[in-house]
Amino acid sequence: MKNPIPESSLVQLPKGPPRELPRIQYAFTTDELGKAHNETQWYRRDAVRKAAQKSWKSYRAFAWRHDELAPQSLTGKDSFAGWGATLVDSLDTLWIMGLREEFDEAVRAVGAIDWNKSSSPHCSLFETNIRYLGGLLSAYDLSGREILFKKAVELGDMLFAGFDTPNHLPANSYDFKKAKIGELSASSRQSLAVLGSMSMEFTRLSQLTGDPKYYSIVEQLKKGLEKTQEQTNLPGLWPKYIDLIEGTRPRSDTLFTLGAQADSAYEYLSKTYLLLGGLDPSYELMHVKAMDAAVKHLLFRPMLPSGDDDTYEAGSPPPPDILFSGNAVSTQRDKSHLQPRVQHLGCFAGGMFALGGKLFDRPDHVQIGEQLARGCAWAYEAFSTGIMPEVSELVPCGEKVEREAGEDDDHLTQKCPWNEAKWRQKKKKAAAAAAAAMNTRFAASDTTNSQTTTLPKPFTKLLDPHYLLRPEAIESLFVLYRITGKKDLLDIAWRMFQSITKATETKFAFSAIEHVHIQNPGQPTTKTDSMESFWMAETLKYFYLIFSPEDGGAAEGSGGEEEEGLTLDGWVFNTEAHPFRVPRPIDG
């Protein structure tokens, strides 16, 4: 390395046996899990497994060793350096589903990957870490196959060179030629997610190899985030972008979010704490500060149709008790302006709040997590396809969107009556803005913009109507079911799975779709010929696991290789749904 880390500066993993942490997963009883319950879940799980087999078979036939399958044109696409993103990302899914022949073939193909040969001159440090390195480490933890460990170390050493910069902060745009001569440089405008989403993979690599260099580099990142957490406009939260030239200095950026470009940085705080066996209390402090600040500035209750709405059917149940996560704009310390903008990516937040709530004895956060998870599930069922869009806006409760430190969190507890005029006014304003942006000639009215006028209440506009086969909504339902044991979440998940497969299935696989809200629910959706690797790695895995035995037992037909259950106490999932083994006191 051109900028080596002195051996004296290497930080060892925390010493001592793992702590006895609070139980995370609900204690299911045999009385709760009767024969009828189990038979229903086996049927559902088998349907998910068949969808995965269909997807994998087509990837194997038409895009083998490419990053992705184009599910309509039936060709391979290389979006992530051409090392086979779907191949590596799907390893643990194949193992968990008991598809041993497919897994064995995939492992042989992974063993032949040459990281020195790529389809492009650069790669994303972030994506390579969560998809490739995370996939290899997880598959090794599950199967014990040594070739997977060998490939993980190879890749980990390559990614470690991404920190060969003057200040040892990461260069997410990983140029292979520059990396070989130590000429990479960190960015003055780097997404928060890049900075905060290396800790799990690099920590696990140090745990498995005994080499502290990987852990040392992410420990430096953690300390930088810890130092600046109270220095931002919204103390507890970091802005969407960070200046790495100046050493993890929060930029003057005014946007704060749990969505794109920030999401997994927050997700990894509680999860790295768990992975380290609770031996680093700074992760707990950072997580709790961040979640409390998010409650204050980012979460909101939507205005929902109710009994006084003339379109509300008599006898219908009352509006659900749900929350959403939006964005906050802050130009002044401790003050923010809410943007009620809902991202599918942000739907992971329900699971994050609930997991941290159990770990750190915050039952209020477990409740918030459930409200968030049910919010995204409700948004799915609000649209004609039964799927929520990539990005949308809706009407929040209350007129006040300005928030300050020290105020009560009434915005999460106080429900509001439906206001038809207010909703129509905001829809009209959204239509006008869309017309202006498109430079069209039609006048904005309730009847001119069909996409806006037919939106379900209380949505006012779709900023991105696609569904990309994303996993975040089912991820949170899975976590909440495992934490609360509430069986209705299984039925919600099943309806979600049925809607997704109906809207996205092609002859040979499944595809992202162009629009989740179509005028005629009977007409077919428009497919975009895209099936990213997270469809197999995350979406189908979480659907499979929520319908699996609550101890995560191995699939029937797995060749007798019974695995330790994938409980939330024994395993922790990275942001690509790759489970890492959690050190337990008995192991210490």
Image (tube, rainbow, N blue to C red):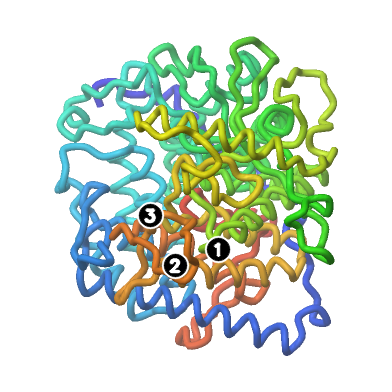
Of 102 and 508, the residue lying toward us? 508
Question: Residue 514 bears which disc, if any?
Answer: 3
Q: Earlier in the sequence, mark 1 or mark 2?
A: 1
Residue depicted at x 36% and y 58%: 533
CA–CA distance in space, label 1 to label 2 = 9 Å
With 12 as the anchor, is 121 left or right in this view?
left
Secondary structure found at label 3: loop
Three-letter amino acid code at the position of disc 3: Glu
**Residue that numbered label 1 is attached to:** 386
CA–CA distance in space, label 3 to label 2 = 10 Å
Crowding at mark 2 (Cα within 10 Å: few <14, some 14-19, many 20+): many
Q: Is residue 158 above or below residue 469?
A: above
CA–CA distance in space, label 3 to label 1 = 14 Å
Mark 2 and mark 1 in contact (Cβ < 8 Å)? yes
Three-letter amino acid code at the position of disc 1: Gly
Of 76 and 563, the residue lying toward us? 76
Hey, which quadrant is residue 202 in on the image?
Answer: top left
Residue depicted at x 52% and y 68%: 499
Mark 1 and mark 3 in contact (Cβ < 8 Å)? no
Secondary structure found at label 2: helix
**Residue that numbered label 2 is attached to:** 503
Q: In which quadrant will I find the N terminus?
A: top left
